[in-house]
Image (tube, rainbow, N blue to C red):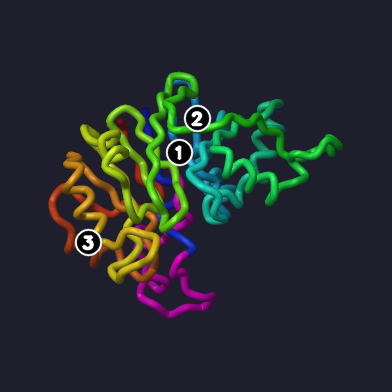
Amino acid sequence: MTITFLGTGTSQGVPVIACTCPVCLSNDKHDKRLRTSILIESDNKVISIDAGPDFRYQMLREKVMHLDAIVFTHEHKDHVAGLDDIRAFNYKQQGPVDIYADERVQLALRREFPYIFDNHGYPGIPQITLHNVTLQPFNIGNVHFTPIEVMHYKLPVKGYRIKDFTYITDAKTVSVAEKEKIRGTKTLVINALQKETHISHFTLDEAIAFAREIGAEKTYLTHISHRLGKHADISKELPDGIQLAYDGLKLNI
């Protein structure tokens, strides 16, 4: 099974157009961070976790020719705004794309994309099949998902464990019970927004502490803002076994 980091950035702390900050001016490909999501490719399924505003470009960049499902973590725009762009897959596959989301996220999708859910059947609108996500494990083909609830300030967000790989974005706190679902993970992906304290995201130090507590063999930091700094500079500060993820990084799990 292959994991591709479609994006490792965030709308939080993104400078304005024509910014002259070091990250914006960097020529290092590792500093070109689109909104956070990953692509999972198994023997029989292709699945995206989240579909933010950069979804269309991410699919084109990675030459994704087929998409079976999108699994959503939560309803913020930087994670759901690309849903409309599944219509290209609908056309090519001649069928709907499966959408996995909890009830709260489904309500948000209905508000944001009402034309997808109306009864008029307007030609060309995105075709989806909704599946409800709870905290119970579920399968998409041969890919087994264990949902993990983390808190993004006061908003519950779903992380997901797949085999010995755990993917979490937008976390600030994780309960003891949910941490138990993560323990034994060999590869952990966790958000590290910036160095300064933030109300709803792990800081760099908090993400490192969380990774050490979980004890994963390898940890990749994602959901990185410009405020964190350049990839090359931050990489020098990280302990063994912890590194910054970057757009296009591929892992075999």
Can you identify the residue that label 2 sits on? 46
> Of helix, strand and loop, which mostly describes the magenta segment?
loop
Estimate the x, y position of residue 228 in percent, counting from the top left.
Answer: 32, 67
User: Is 38 within the magenta?
Assistant: yes
Circles 1 and 2: CB atoms closer than 8 Å: yes
Residue farthest toward the left in the current orientation of the protein: 240
User: In front: mark 1 or mark 3?
Assistant: 3
Q: Amino acid at mark 1?
A: Leu
Say whether residue 40 is left or right of residue 88: left
Q: Can residue 228 be seen at all in this image of the molecule?
A: no
Q: Earlier in the sequence, mark 1 or mark 3?
A: 1
Residues in magenta, as a range: 12-39
User: Is 125 within the magenta?
Assistant: no
Secondary structure beneath dot 2 equals strand
Can you identify the residue that label 1 sits on? 39
Q: Amino acid at mark 2?
A: Val
Residue drawn 19% across the image and 54% down it: 209
